[in-house]
Amino acid sequence: MSEEELQIVEVELCPDCGLPFEYCDWGDCPDVCKAARGEASDHEEGEEGEDKPQKKKGGKKGVKLPQKIEIIRANRGGRKFVTVVIGLETHGIDLTTAATAFRKKFACGASVVRDSTGEESIDIQGDVSFEVMELIEAKFNIPEKMISSSDKKKPKKAKTAGSGGRGKKSRAMQSALKENA
């Protein structure tokens, strides 16, 4: 291409949505953008001065903005744990692909689970919360600041010294206690 064919075009961007003004109607908040430009948001004035309703432009509805990814370690009973990963789908990651990657990396069960509210998450068998965080950063290129980790576990009962068994101490233990006293 020659230099004559190329033209530099400056495009003004909307300060609210960041799109060019021509595309504000398809953004997340078209009414806010029109108000910022000083246009009427609900009605458009016709040729004879009448107000006629403005046609709504089609667009994607229900698009979720990226949110923080939560990694939760939940107690499954006894000494068994489940690591739950919530929020990967908001970053455009297919949950079945991610579950397969977790299965291969940690050699354990991982499945996509839908809760009662309809939100999907990934359940991974075992306590692999820190390794999952590193894998998400490396494989899916998500920054560390977008990932949060928390524990949901029952507090352990405090064990007191010498409470095991019937309360009897062995002869070796009794002699050790006498020497230290």
Image: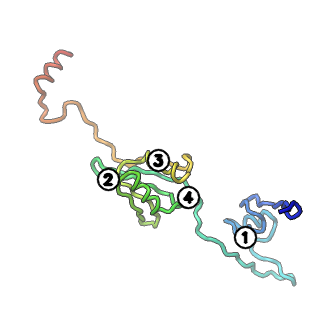
Task: Identify the residue at the far right of this view.
Answer: 4
Disc 4 designates what residue? 91
Q: Is residue 125 left or right of residue 175?
A: right
Q: Tell me whether the residue at label 1 lies in contact with that at label 4, contact meaning CB atoms closer than 8 angstroms.
A: no
Label of residue 25 in the image: 1
Disc 1 or 2, which lies upstream in sequence? 1
Task: Name the amino acid, label 4.
Answer: His
Query: Where residue 32 sits in the image (x, y, percent)?
Result: 73, 64
Q: CA distance from mark 3 to mark 4?
A: 17 Å
Task: Name the amino acid, label 3.
Answer: Ser
Label of residue 76 in the image: 2
Q: For the residues carrying marks 1 and 4, which lies nearer the camera in this image?
A: 4
Could you say which quadrant of the image residue 177 lies in? top left
How many C-alpha atoms fall within 10 Å of the one at disc 1: few (<14), some, or many (≥20)? some
Disc 3, SS: strand
How many C-alpha atoms fall within 10 Å of the one at disc 3: few (<14), some, or many (≥20)? some
Disc 3 designates what residue? 149
Could you say which quadrant of the image residue 4 lies in? bottom right
